[in-house]
Amino acid sequence: MSDNVTFQNLGAKEFLRRYPITYIDISRNAPTVPAGAPPAPAPVKGNPAAGQGSIHKQRRVYHITLSPRPDPLAPVTSARCPLPVKIYLDPDPNGIPVFYLPYRNNENYRITLDAAGPGAAAVNFFLTELVDGCTVYVEGTRDKPTCYHINANSIAQTNDPTLPTHLNAMAAAAGTNLAGLNTQQLHDVQFGFKFAHMDNRFQNDAAHRPKTVVAGVNLEQAKKVEERDYMIVPGTANETAFNNTLALLQAQFIVPTRVNGKTVHEMRFVSSQGFIFGIRTGVDWKFYVQRKALVEYFHRTHAIGAQARQLFKGIPRPLYSLGMQNIVLGVTQFWPTSKTGRNA
């Protein structure tokens, strides 16, 4: 079942406040793909050998189909967060036209949202791949912004200690002592290296920037969304603080108070991601990030024996799982101006 009608009736922003985007699929093998269509990601120009590329104007526009899909691993839903949505991208002209920005590990991809190229004048929506560590930058003018999806997968990695990009090697070179750091502090150091690397690639990439951005007029301040803007780090104080927001999220109808007739007594964070999108109204673009989390709910048993042990021995009543759910924590505008809060 397609949810394109709901998307159009609610408006993109309101739709994405309710429906968590959990997967993007490039349906290259569908019957609607024309013969000889190039493989994903879209062809680029620029300098792919140096990790720099821009999406070719002939392949910037896709058509999407939004399909709500029951998640067998996270079947719980709520009033404000119905079924998670899978996005299918395809050249099918019956879908919603979008500008689509792909990504590759350790590379920079960019796209300029203007009317040049097939079908581009009719596009009012932009999306890039789901993010769980990448940085997305937007710069330019409101009517012709340029977006960058920059990945730093190999920077400050922890898999191969023989590489100079290993976290330990980079910390040693920077004179940073990792001994005794807690999970949050270690994460901050690791992503500090990643952020600096991605910022450097963006700020010093003038040779590959569009001329209209480098020398344009009425330019907006460049803005970015990075990992700390949409992710919750497991094993940190941020995770603990999030788990304690159960009552608030229930009051907002984002998470349920009962599952299968059982009261939800506790919520625990499982994972998080971000989904970055843009909306054009008239001639002006605005960009947002959907912050999504996967959570698990628990019910505390009311068995008489367990209640007695809690009363006389102080032993908490056992918890058992009620299942998991994908939820939208909020939609935040970040370009051209930054607005925080669920209804930004």
Image (cartoon, rainbow, N blue to C red):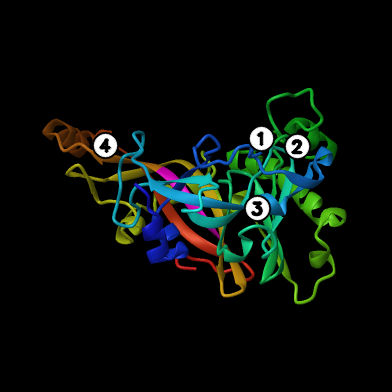
Residues under labels 2 and 3: Cα distance? 45 Å
Residue at numbered disc 1: 180
Mark 4 Cα within 10 Å, few/some/many (few <14, many 20+)? some
Residue flagged by tag 4: what amino acid is it? Answer: Pro
| Mark 4 / mark 1, whichever is N-terminal | 1
Residue at numbered disc 3: 60
Examine the structure image and report whether residue 88 is included in the region drawn in magenta: no
**CB-based contact (under 8 Å), mark 2 and mark 4:** no
Farthest front residue?
A: 35
Residue flagged by tag 1: what amino acid is it? Answer: Gly
Residue flagged by tag 2: what amino acid is it? Answer: Asn
Left-right relation of 237 to 100: left
Residue flagged by tag 3: what amino acid is it? Answer: Arg
Q: Which residues are magenta?
A: 288-294
Residue 177, numbered label: 2
Examine the structure image and report whether residue 293 is included in the region drawn in magenta: yes
Q: SS of the residue at dot 4?
A: loop
Residue at numbered disc 4: 316
**CB-based contact (under 8 Å), mark 2 and mark 1:** yes
Farthest right residue?
A: 207
Measured as percent of width and height from the top left, residue 178 is found at 71, 35
Residues under labels 2 and 1: Cα distance? 8 Å
